[in-house]
Image (cartoon, rainbow, N blue to C red):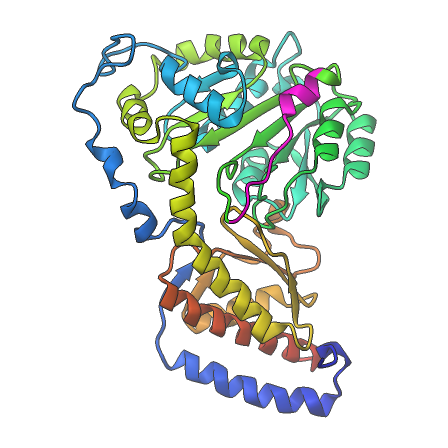
Amino acid sequence: MIKPVYEWSHAELEALKVELEAEYSEFSSRNLALNMARGKPSSGLLDHNMNVLDKLENPCAADGTDARNYGILDGLPEMRRFFGEVLNIDPERIIVGGNSSLTLMYDSIVRLMMFGSCGFPAWRSLPKLKFLCPSPGYDRHFAITQEFGFEMIPVPMTENGPDMDMVEELAAGDEAIKGIWCVPLYSNPQGVCYSDETVSRLGKMKTAAPDFKIFWDNAYGVHHLYEEVKLADIFAACEAGGNPDRAYMFFSTSKITFPGAGVAMMASSVNERKEILKHMGIQTIGSDKLNQLRTLRVLKDAPTLKKHMAELAEVLRPKFDIVLKTLDAELKDGAFASWITPRGGYFVSLDTLDGCAKKTLELAKNAGVTMTGAGATFPYKNDPHDRNIRIAPTYPSNDELQTAMKLFCVCVKLAAVKKLCGEF
């Protein structure tokens, strides 16, 4: 076992730097143009879903409703039953939206800002607003709360979810803290799965704000790479804790069928659902029921979806294997970085040595590989240790990914050596 790089002598570091700079120059000479910046499905994944586009011979729903026309604000009943079966929740909690769960999250914040909920005042009328942000986390979540002026409070992630001791202390001590972002299964970017205890504590914890909300973005709830991981029921946890109106759940088929052309949904308590529909009835006459029909006619039910996701996993798994095997082969000896092996989802999270993430990504970009920007996984894009990098392996071809990962590992090592040599 090679000793950690931070224990190397200056002479050893200089010798390694010469080797790495030669490798880096060779990669740079290839004029690469590889993009791993977002978690986009590959062409192979999208090709697998093309039959969704062929399922509109009959535009009528099961009850005879013509899906080409106006109406059915909360979505086709069979679409709500489908989501209920897949996610093991009561369809009466569900509202089917358009193609984007992110839009439903944004709209939910807007409604709370403008109108409040369940008799509590509109958030915009309050002097201060704060939101808990488990970090590393999803940059688009943070962008929403930042846009509306919330003070975002980072909460460290553990192997079981957010640090619940910190979450409970903060939420109980400050009525300005109005909610928490959660990606509870295969979290973005670390792939963390919330434990049953974490879910229970979120549901029952005392909060100074009586209208505290859990934004439960179950984006990867069916994206298993290996064995299926079960997630505890957040609604049951909230009800058991005496907080039945606390949670909003979000989900979509965007990475199951087509990004930008899937079907999104949100779920809440029955009381909250009634209020949400009241405002939605002014905002829209209803979402795209034709898309609901064609999606449902392919995915059909929970067993069919499970088979479909297993087939997609067969395409995704080799990509994750490339990433993890390359990291293990190139970075383990010398302890240049640490990473988490996810069991599902769309990302791999890696931590460089402190102070090296920005330099690593700068080197990679200059050599032709674009990745998610440093700091993006933290509120305000401020990683206090400048070390976390989100690797998105899903979009490139396997050959491109292999090249990109080899270059990336050279960049991780070169940045570490330059840092330890005092060059930045």
Is 188 placed above or below 405 here? Answer: above
Is residue 232 among what the camera can see? yes
Q: Percent from the top left, x then y, of residue 339?
A: 63, 60
Choose between 335 and 25: the one closer to the eye.
335
Determine the residue positioned at 82% across, 37% down. 165
Q: Percent from the top left, x then y, of residue 379?
A: 63, 45
Residue 76 lies in the magenta-colored region: no
Determine the residue positioned at 64% across, 49% down. 136
Is 396 placed above or below 198 here? Answer: below
Q: Quadrant of residue 216?
A: top right
Determine the residue positioned at 63% across, 25% down. 233
Is 230 placed above or below 211 here? Answer: below
Q: Percent from the top left, x then y, of residue 42?
A: 35, 52
Q: Percent from the top left, x then y, of residue 244?
A: 67, 14
Choose between 121 and 327: the one closer to the eye.
327
Q: In the current view of this chain or complex, which residue is farthest to the left?
A: 57
Is residue 424 among what the camera can see? no
402 to the left or right of 298: right
Residue 228 lies in the magenta-colored region: yes
Q: Quadrant of the C terminus?
A: bottom right
85 to the left or right of 203: left
Choose between 47 and 131: the one closer to the eye.
47
| Count of numbered marks | 0
Q: Quadrant of residue 113?
A: top right
391 to the left or right of 68: right
Q: Quadrant of the N terminus?
A: bottom right
45 to the left or right of 366: left
Q: Which residues are magenta?
A: 226-239
Determine the residue positioned at 25% across, 8% down. 64
Is 108 placed above or below 357 here? Answer: above
Q: Quadrant of residue 404?
A: bottom left
